[in-house]
Image (cartoon, rainbow, N blue to C red):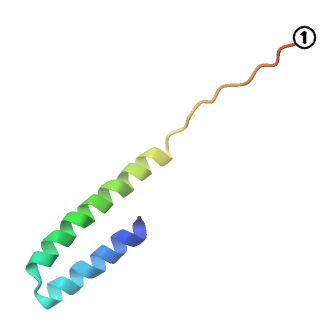
């Protein structure tokens, strides 16, 4: 996802240099979506899940 974000930033810079204003706006929307996804991933990566401790039964 970070690679996609970086690519979008490069494409925005190119579109701005070339004067492709409509393209710039569309790419900025895509960039915002990619940044949002990265933020979601970052928030989830710090979350831990308690799976509990398994118990063994001594009965047969």
In the image, what residue occupies the spot 41% across and 67% down? 2
Q: Quadrant of residue 50?
A: top right
> Callout 1: 10 Å neighbours few (<14), some, many (20+)?
few
**Quadrant including the C terminus:** top right
Q: Position of residue 4 (x, y in %)?
A: 37, 70
Extreme residue in the front direction: 60
In the image, what residue occupies the spot 88% across and 9% down? 59
Residue 59 position (above or below residue 54): above
Residue 60 position (above or below residue 35): above
Q: Quadrant of residue 57?
A: top right
Residue 22 is left or right of residue 47, and the answer is: left
Q: Position of residue 12 (x, y in %)?
A: 22, 78
Extreme residue in the bottom direction: 18
Residue 60 position (above or below residue 33): above
Residue 53 position (above or below residue 41): above
Extreme residue in the top direction: 59
Q: Which residue is mark 1?
A: 60
**Quadrant including the N terminus:** bottom left
In the image, what residue occupies the spot 63% across and 30% down? 51
In the image, what residue occupies the spot 15% across and 76% down? 24
Secondary element at tag 1? loop
Residue 48 is left or right of residue 42, and the answer is: right
Q: Position of residue 20 (x, y in %)?
A: 12, 84
């Amino acid at each position: 996802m970070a690679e996609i974000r970086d690519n979008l930033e490069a494409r925005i810079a190119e579109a701005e240099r070339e004067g492709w204003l409509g393209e710039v706006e569309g790419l900025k929307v895509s960039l915002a979506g990619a940044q949002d996804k990265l933020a979601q991933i970052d928030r989830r990566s710090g979350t831990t899940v308690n799976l509990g401790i398994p118990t063994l039964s001594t009965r047969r």
